[in-house]
Amino acid sequence: MKQETATFAAGCFWGVEMTFRQIPGVLDAIVGYTGGHTQNPTYREVCSDTTGHAEAIEVTYDPAQVTYERLLEVFWQMHDPTQVNRQGPDIGTQYRSAIFTHSDEQARIARASRDRAQSDFGRPIATEIVPATQFYRAEEYHQRYFESHNVTCHVPVR
């Protein structure tokens, strides 16, 4: 079985992780930090808004079961990509909307998907589309947070 990786930031990573885990063909989704300049950041450091990192999800998926395009469709639906450095009540660069691409092909597909999705929004999409850098796995208590705490999160999927 071939596996591929996709990395997304769409605000608080707990709800984003939960949403991606529900997609058939997603093999794993882990929460972490990426896109910044601090090595091995902690949650406290990322929340200080000084590391440059975003709260992000690294998705491992089987492209024979789910396409990168489908993952992008869900990404656009689960948050407001027109907001800059925030999602809902969460404010700071760590909550920015971003797609971290792992290849030129992913970058091309992400840009085309953004352009198609733009018609669904009344304001310009602010989502960054940038090459993936080092992904740092978040602390274990953040992994599968909603499952381990028996709570749910409303992530608006249109």
Image (cartoon, rainbow, N blue to C red):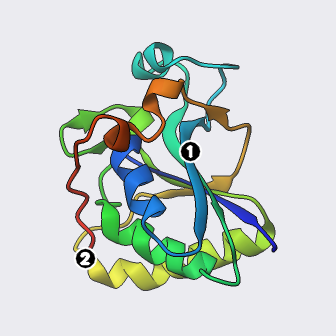
Would residue 151 appear left or right of 59 to someone viewing this image? left
Tell me residue 43's x, y (percent): 47, 20
Residue at 25% from the left image edge and 36% from the top image edge: 90
For residue 91, what is the image quadrant? top left
Q: Position of residue 47 (x, y in %)?
A: 40, 21
Q: Nearer the viewer, residue 80 or 119?
A: 80
Return the residue at label 1. Answer: 30
Q: CA distance from mark 1 to mark 2?
A: 23 Å
Label 1 secondary element: strand
Name the disc covering residue 158, or none.
2
For the residue marked with disc 2, what is the amino acid?
Answer: Arg
Task: Residue 22 in the image: state x and y as whole percent.
Answer: 42, 66
Q: Residue at x 74, y 66 (%)?
A: 4
- Name the quadrant containing residue 3: bottom right
Q: Residue at x 62, y 81 (%)?
A: 67
Q: Residue at x 40, y 58 (%)?
A: 126
- In this rendering, the label closer to the viewer, 1 or 2: 1
